[in-house]
Image: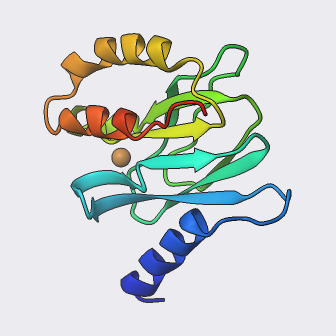
């Protein structure tokens, strides 16, 4: 499949509203180069509902994903290098994660599940991460700023 179709399929999978109560699967690509430059999760922000699954797809090699800040009660997760990884998000809140080999290049992402009750806690913890982001630290703010307030 061409890169364009792949990207299109990802966009559709993430943005098409799900009319039923069936849990959705969101795909996040791990890329050496994406719309936002080198070493990225794409999309870097996912809005999910409790029970949805997030699948991280290693489109390029040398990436993996590790949770950094998760809602209370959630077991932290960590994938294996170069392997696809799925996590089911049951707990509402904000999840901040990164790719350990490319943390200094700000290869980070955010998942919002339902209401962002723990956003302030995640923001505080994110400040401890910031000094490690040597390049593209603005990605941290960009990802967190997409979190939508509870309605
Ligand atoms: Cu990486």
Q: Residue at x 71, y 50 (%)?
A: 53
User: Which residue is outermost to the front?
Assistant: 151
User: 136 above or below 70?
Assistant: below
User: Which residue is outermost to the right?
Assistant: 21
Which image quarter: residue 92?
top right
> Could you tell me residue 36's position as x and y percent?
23, 57
Q: Residue at x 48, y 11 (%)?
A: 121
Nearest to the observer: residue 123 or residue 130: 123
Q: Residue at x 69, y 59 (%)?
A: 25
> Could you tell me residue 126's position as x and y percent?
36, 18
Q: Residue at x 79, y 44 (%)?
A: 51
> Could you tell me residue 37's position as x and y percent?
20, 57
Nearest to the observer: residue 133 or residue 114: 114
Label count reads 0
For the rendered model, the colour scheme is rainbow
Q: Quarter of the image containing the C terminus?
A: top right
User: 5 above or below 145?
Assistant: below
> Could you tell me residue 59's position as x and y percent?
44, 66
Image side of residue 91 versus residue 77, left or right: right
User: 73 above or below 113?
Assistant: above
């Amino acid at each position: 499949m061409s890169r364009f179709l792949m990207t299109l399929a990802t966009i559709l999978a993430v943005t098409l509203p799900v009319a039923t109560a069936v849990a959705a699967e969101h795909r996040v690509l791990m890329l050496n180069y994406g719309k936002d430059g080198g070493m990225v999760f794409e999309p870097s922000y996912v809005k999910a509902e409790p029970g949805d699954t997030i699948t991280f797809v290693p489109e390029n090699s040398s990436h993996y994903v590790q949770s950094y800040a998760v809602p209370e009660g959630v077991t932290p997760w960590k994938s294996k290098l170069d392997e696809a990884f799925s996590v089911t998000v049951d707990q509402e809140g904000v999840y901040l994660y990164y790719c350990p080999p490319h943390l200094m290049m700000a290869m980070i992402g955010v998942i919002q599940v339902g209401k962002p009750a723990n956003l302030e806690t995640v923001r505080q913890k994110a400040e401890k991460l910031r000094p490690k982001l040597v390049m593209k630290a603005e990605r941290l703010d960009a990802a967190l700023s997409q979190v939508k307030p509870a309605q």
